[in-house]
Amino acid sequence: MKHYFAVLLISIYLAPCILAQDTSLYHKVSILGKAYTKTQTEKVEKTLEKMITSSLADQKCIFVENSSARTIFESYNPEFDFMKSSVSQADRKKLKEKGIDYLIIAGISSKSKKYSVFYRIMNTSEEKKEERSLLRSLSAKEVRAALKKALASTDFYQSIAQEKPRPILYGWFEEELSDLIKKGKELGTYLRTIDNSTMVYVAAGPFLAKQNEKTEERNLPSFYIDKYEVSNEQYCLFLNTTQKTEDEKGNSYIDFNNTYCSIEKKEEGYQVKTGKEKHPVISVSWYGAKAYCKWVGGNLPSLDQWNKTLQGGTKTPGWTNSSSSSSVLWQENEEPHRLFPWGNDQPSSFVQRCNYKSNNNVDGYAWTSPVFAFTGIGDSPYGCSNMAGNVWEWSQENFNQEHEGTIEKQCLGGSWGSDVQKIQRDFRFGLSPHIAHNDLGFRVCYNLEKE
Ligand SMILES: [Ca+2]
Ligand SMILES: [Ca+2]
């Protein structure tokens, strides 16, 4: 997971904006893939600042990173909510009143681990809500060229040589952490900042996979996977940020007409129906699930990733024998081919462990439950919740069956409407990627070692 970003890449995060001051830009630059010190990043920052201010002359502008800085930005600027690709007229007006002429949205977009830097420069006087005012768009190539020039100066390299690199940060399993993921507060949890998602870590190593009715040991590289199904609240953030409800081929992401869909379009943007914020998003097509994953830089889980997360590897995290503070120890997996995330016990042997079609709704839910409702009690060995029940989940695995010209995708894990057979590990079925159901959602898998 170390230093695989071969080229010079930048990410811009918003620093506290002091709008009242008359200086132009407030931002912080970090170069991914290399541990740079604060002083080093400030040098790069200055270069960028010069480059952009020179293109905008004297006009006042502020920097906004378009995704992961949302929380940071809003905590400093609670009166604004413009962390969307499209900025509302009301927010532009507020900015204009503060004397801000331009809003610069900057960030990195990633596709198959190839990152590009983008800028959008928006005129706050622009009155149309939907239309972006692109005064100038800088390509990654232009930005890199400018940075390269700055970095080539002797001064810069001399100062780098004198400074110590930033210490490398480690996760709960002593794996090296990337800049994109933070260690969470709870033992074994991680935070993906862009959508505030909690993840768990599945370490590299063997697990038991089923192949043609035989069981074989198979290795997988390490990955992170969402602890919970993606919620309505998170999907709503995605819709409001990207302002897209279909991909470039016109494949729809979400079926708002489905009676059970808990996200609706209002004049001020997409909103979750009250009380459904923490419930899993449903009525999403495979395309809609995939687009969300792409937005956060991840992917849907493969069948192997799903099964390993569900049943554990040949070793599993020994939560109880771990010292509560620093890292997690390992132990033998006593049920390496288990039927349910928690083991081979039926879901209601002693306690209710998940949301499925239980007799008389004894699990407490006739329909979806909040994504964290069975945390702990129904978790997989790695701490992943709802891998049995609540909603079926889209995977990236094909079902090898054509349906109106498209290949079906496998749906995993069962739902609130599934009986006990259908929430077991090996029960799965295929659906056309266009389909959106009221018991079908997804979660994100985040493989940092691929490619
Ligand atoms: Ca139920
Ligand atoms: Ca599920």
Image (cartoon, grey):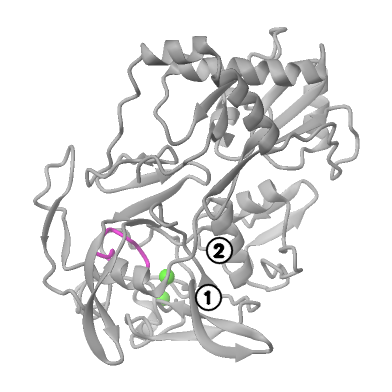
Residue 134 seen: yes
**What amino acid type should be assigned to the residue bearing mark 1?**
Asp
Residue 432 vertical placement versus 63 (above, below): below
Is-magenta flag for residue 383?
yes
Front-most of residues 374 and 332: 332
- Name the magenta segment's main secondary structure: loop
Would residue 385 be found to the left or right of residue 42 on screen? left
**What amino acid type should be assigned to the residue bearing mark 2?**
Val
Give x and y (percent) for residue 237.
61, 49
Q: Residue at x 42, y 44 (%)?
A: 4
Task: Give SS at disc 2.
Answer: loop
Q: Quadrant of the C terminus?
A: bottom left
Q: Residues within 10 Å of mark 1 (few under 14, many from 20)?
A: many
Residue 223 vertical placement versus 181 (above, below): below
Front-most of residues 334 and 379: 334
Q: Quadrant of residue 27?
A: top right
Q: CA distance from mark 1 to mark 2?
A: 9 Å
Span colored in magenta? 378-386
Q: Residue at x 42, y 37 (%)?
A: 179
User: Mark 2 — residue?
Assistant: 281
Q: Quadrant of residue 170?
A: top left
Give x and y (percent) for residue 209.
27, 78
User: Mark 1 — residue?
Assistant: 439
Q: Who comes first in sequence, dot 1 or dot 2?
A: 2
Is-magenta flag for residue 309?
no
Front-most of residues 126 and 237: 126
Give x and y (percent) for residue 354.
34, 71
Would residue 72 be found to the left or right of residue 160 on screen? right
Q: Residue at x 70, y 53 (%)?
A: 270
